[in-house]
Image: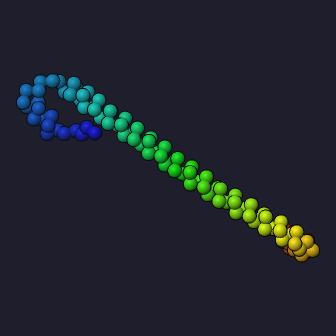
Amino acid sequence: MATIDLTKDTKRRGAGDDRPASERFTEQASAVSSDIQGMGAIARDVAHEKLEEFQENASAVYEQGRDKVREATRTLERFIAEQPLTSVLVAAGVGLFLGRFWMRR
C-alpha cells in the first residue's frame, strides 16, 4: 500500500526532481487508487467468506430445528395413538380455554 511521504517528495525535489507538481500528484493519486482497489478486493473476499460461513451455520441450525419438529410430531402422534380419549379431552380443553381467552378481547 502506498503512503504519502512528504519528506521523501521534498528531498527528491530538492535533489533535482524537476517534475511539475501536477505530474507528481498524478503519480501519487494513481498509487492511492490502486491501493484502494486492492483494499476493495480484499473486503469483497472477506465479505464472501463471512457470507458462506453464515449460510453454513444457518443451514445447520435449520436442519436441527427441522429434526426437532419431526421428533415432536412423532411423539405427539404416538401419544394420540396410545391414548386417544385423553388426547380428545386435552384438545377440547385447550380449545375451550383459547375460545374464552379470545372472546374477552
For this rendering, which residue is in front, 6 or 70? Answer: 70
**On the image, which quarter does residue 1 sit in?**
top left
The residue positioned 32% from the left and 36% from the top of the image is 35
Q: In the picture, which quadrant includes the C terminus? A: bottom right
Is 62 placed left or right of 100 in the picture?
left
Q: Is residue 60 above or below residue 11?
A: below
Q: How is the image coloured?
A: rainbow
**On the image, which quarter does residue 62 sit in?**
bottom right
Q: Is residue 56 above or below residue 34?
A: below
Image coordinates for residue 58, horizontal then vertical, percent = 59, 53
Image coordinates for residue 66, horizontal then vertical, percent = 70, 58
Taking the image as drawn, is residue 90 in sight? yes
The residue positioned 73% from the left and 61% from the top of the image is 69
For this rendering, which residue is in front, 92 or 75? Answer: 75
The residue positioned 65% from the left and 56% from the top of the image is 63
Taking the image as drawn, is residue 99 in sight? no
Is 27 placed left or right of 62 in the picture?
left
The residue positioned 11% from the left and 26% from the top of the image is 17
Residue most extreme to the right: 85
Image coordinates for residue 37, horizontal then vertical, percent = 37, 35
